[in-house]
Image: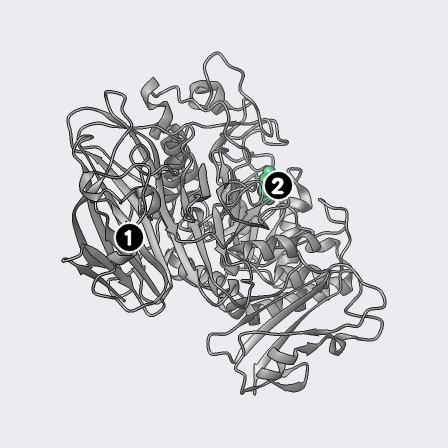
Amino acid sequence: MNIIWNKTYGQFHLYNDSISYIIGTAPGGELTNLYFGKRIHAADDMSYVIFRMGMPNVAVDADTESYSMELNRQEYPSFGTTDFGTQAYEIEMSNGSRVSSFVYKSHTIFPGKKQINGLPATYAKDEEAMTLEVELCDEVAQASLVLSYTIFDRYPVIARHAVFTNRGNTRIKLTRAMSCCLDLPDQDYEWMQFTGAWARERIPETRKLGTGTTSIESKRGTSSANQNPFIIIKRPHTDDFAGEAIGFSFVYSGNFLAAAEGGTHGRLRILMGIHPDRFTWPLDKGDSFETPEVIIAATDKGLNDLSQTYHMLYNNHLVRGKWKNEPRPILNNNWEATFMDFTEEDILRIASKAKEAGVELFVLDDGWFGERNDDFAGLGDWVENPEKLPQGMSGLARKINAMGLKFGFWIEPEMVNPNSNLYRRHPDWVLATPGRKSSLGRHQLVLDFSRPEVVDHIYNMLFKVMSDAPISYIKWDMNRSLTEVFSMDASSEEQGTVYHRYVMGVYSLYSRLIEAFPDILFESCSSGGNRFDAGMLYYAPQAWCSDNTDAIDRIRIQYGSSYGYPIVSIGSHVSAVPNQQTGRSVSISTRANVAYFGTFGYELDLNELSDEEFAEVKDQIAFMKKYRDLIQFGRFYRLRSPFETDQAAWMVVSEDRSRAVVGFYCMRSNVNTLPGFLKLAGLDPDRQYSMEGEKYYGDELMNMGITLMRFYKEGFTISEDHASFVTVLEAV
Ligand code: GLA
C-alpha cells in the first residue's frame, strides 16, 4: 500500500495490491478523477486522460478553451460553473450566491487514519492504512474543503469524507455536503439496492443504469428499512461468483441520499451522503462541518468477494471493544413469549428452561419500566415497575445470574409516550412543530436528541438501572420515524441542523454508555431492521435483523443483509410456530438451520415445546456452540439465491479452508423434479473433505457439487416445502 504524490503533474496515486485510485488536478485547479479500479502501474503522467479535444458549450477559461468540467470526471463537483451534473456540495454565501469552486491548495499524506468528531468511522493502525488529505480553497467563499481518502492495506477499499471550514468573517451556509462523489467513465453498469419495509427488510433490487438519475434515500430520520444506505454498482453479468462491482456503504444512521447519474457524454456519477433535504448547516468564522464517511469497495471477482470485504473490514476496523471478533452469546428473549404481560416468576420460569437447554444469556424485553403494560404508556420513565420486578432489575439480574445465565434488557431511549412522567414534566423535549399536530407512531413521540440536556437526562436514568444490576447486554430499540421535525431549543437558522444533530445525539448517548459499561454487548434494533447500517455497527456490533422471525421469510432477509453486513452482526432467533407475523408453521430444525447464520438465539418460551423438540433444541445449542466461531467469522458465500429460485443455500469456510458449514433450504416444493446438485465455493480444490461420513475432493464439491439426493432420508425429501439441512465439512 502506498500513496504517491507526483508533484510535477499534480497527481496522486493511492494503491495497494488490488486497487488503484488516481486523482489529478484539473486545468482549473479542481480535483479530477483519473482512474479507479484494479491495481495498475503508476505512469509518470496520467493527465492524458483529461479530455480536452471537444468543443464544449462553455469552457473553463480562455487558456483552457477546450476544457469543460462537464466532459471530465470530478472528485467533488460543484454546480454553477461548467459542470451541469449533480453537485456534491453547495454553499450559500452571505450575498445569496451559490456558485463556488474549490481548487487545490496543499495536501498531507500520513500513515493510519483519523477519526471523525462525534461520528462513527472505520479505524486503522499506522501499518494498516494510509490517508491522503487534500486541502482545497475557495477564495471568494473564504472557505476551505478537505477531501480525505484512506486506503487500507489488506482490503480493496477507499474510505472517503469531506470537511468544510469557514475561513472568513461572515457566516456561510452549507446546504448540501455529500460524503463522496465517484465519477466513472462509462455507464455499462447495473445498480443494486436493498429495499423493503418493516418485516421485509433489505431485499435486493437490480436495474440497468443509463442516462438520467437513479437514486434511493431516507428522510425518516433513521437509515430505514425502506432503503438501506448501501448500494452496489456492477457490470451487467457480474454475479456472486465473478465480475466487477463497486460497493458504497454509508457509515451513518440518519437521512441519506445515494444516487447514480448518467450524463449524456457517458460519464456515470455516484454520490452518497446526508440527504440535502432539510439540511442547512451555518458556519461562522472558524467553524467546521465534517461529513460522515463512505466506504467504497471494489472487486473483479463477484459479489461474494465484495461482501467478504465488507464483512472483514467491518469486523476488524469498525466494530470495537470487547465484542470485536468475539463469538456472540446464545440468548433467549421473552418478547414473543410474553409481550408486556409478565411477572418475575414467568421470566424466571422461561430463563430456567433456557438454562437447561444450554442458553447463555437471558434478555428481558419491553414492559419492565414505568407504567409500561401496553404501547400507550411508560416510554421515557426508565425506572422499574415494582409489580413486575419486585426487587428491581438488580433483583431479577441476580436471580438469573445465580442460574448461571448472563442477563440483559431492552430500552428505547430516544422515545417518549405522551402518557409518561417525562413528557408531563418536559413537554418541550420532543421534536414537534409549534402550532401543528404531532403525528404519533406506536403512540409515541421522538425525544429531541439534538439537545444535550435531553440526552443527559436519559443517560442518567439508564446509568442508574444499568449500574445497579449486573448487566451483560442491552437491546436498544427505536420504533418510529421522525416527523414534524423542529427543535424548540434551536433558532430559525439552526432548524436545518436538527436531523443531523439528532443522530449525533444518539451516537453521543451510545458513546457515553459504552464508556461507562465497556463490556456490555449492545444490539441495535429499530422495529426490527429499520436502522441496520454501518454507523450503528460502530456502537452496537449486532442488530436485530427483522421483527419477521418466520424462517422462510428470514432466509431472504438474511440473504439480502449479507451483501453489506457481517454474518455476526445479523440478529437471528428461533421463534414459536405458527409464526406471529406470517402464521406459517415450520419445523424447529429448519427454524434453527436459518437462525444459525447470524447471532443465534430463541424468541420463545422453551417450556412450551414438546419433549422431542426440546431435545432437539439442546442439540441445536450444542451445535452452535461448536461451530459459531466458524459461522460468525468465516468467509461467507451465497450459493443459491432465494430471489431467483425456490431454494436457497449459503456456506461459511474457515480462513485456512479446512472446515465449512453449508446451509440449504427448500422454500417451496417443485413436485416431480430431480433434486439436482449444489455447487460449493471457497474450498481447497486439492483437499479431501469428510461430509456426512463420506469423503469428497474440494474440486468435486465446487465443480460437480453435492448431490442433493445425499440428503434424502426416510420420510423426508429435501425438495419438500420448508425442508432444509445444515452440514459440516472437515478436511481429512
Ligand atoms: C420492537 C422490536 C421487537 C420488540 C418490541 C418491543 O418492535 O423490534 O423486537 O423489542 O419492539 O416493544
In this view, 707 is above or below 651:
below
Of the image marks 1 and 2, the number of the one nearer the N terminus: 1
> Could you tell me which quadrant the C terminus lies in?
bottom right
The disc at residue 50 is 1
Q: Quadrant of residue 9?
A: bottom left
Q: Is residue 289 above or below residue 616?
A: above
Q: Secondary structure at mark 2?
A: loop
Classify residue 274 as left or right of residue 611.
Answer: left
Q: Amino acid at mark 1?
A: Ile
Is residue 35 visible in this depiction of the protein? yes
Residue 162 in the image: state x and y as whole percent. Answer: 29, 43
Q: Which residue is mark 2?
A: 198
Tell me where residue 559 appears, x and y as whole percent.
60, 57
Q: Which quadrant is home to the N terminus?
A: bottom left
Which residue is at 76% across, 77% downward?
709
Q: Residue 672 at x, y = what percent?
A: 85, 68
Please tell me how many numbered marks the rendered image carries: 2
**Amino acid type at mark 2:** Trp
The residue depicted at 22 percent of the width and 24 percent of the height is 171
Is 341 left, or right, of 626 in this rendering? right
Asked whether mark 1 and ligand 1 are closer than 8 Å, the reply comes as: no
**As rendered, which of 616 and 563 lies closer to the eye?**
563
The nearer-to-camera label among 1 and 2 is 1
* Residue nearest the viewer, comparing 145 with 631: 145
Q: Nearer the viewer, residue 97 or 275?
A: 97
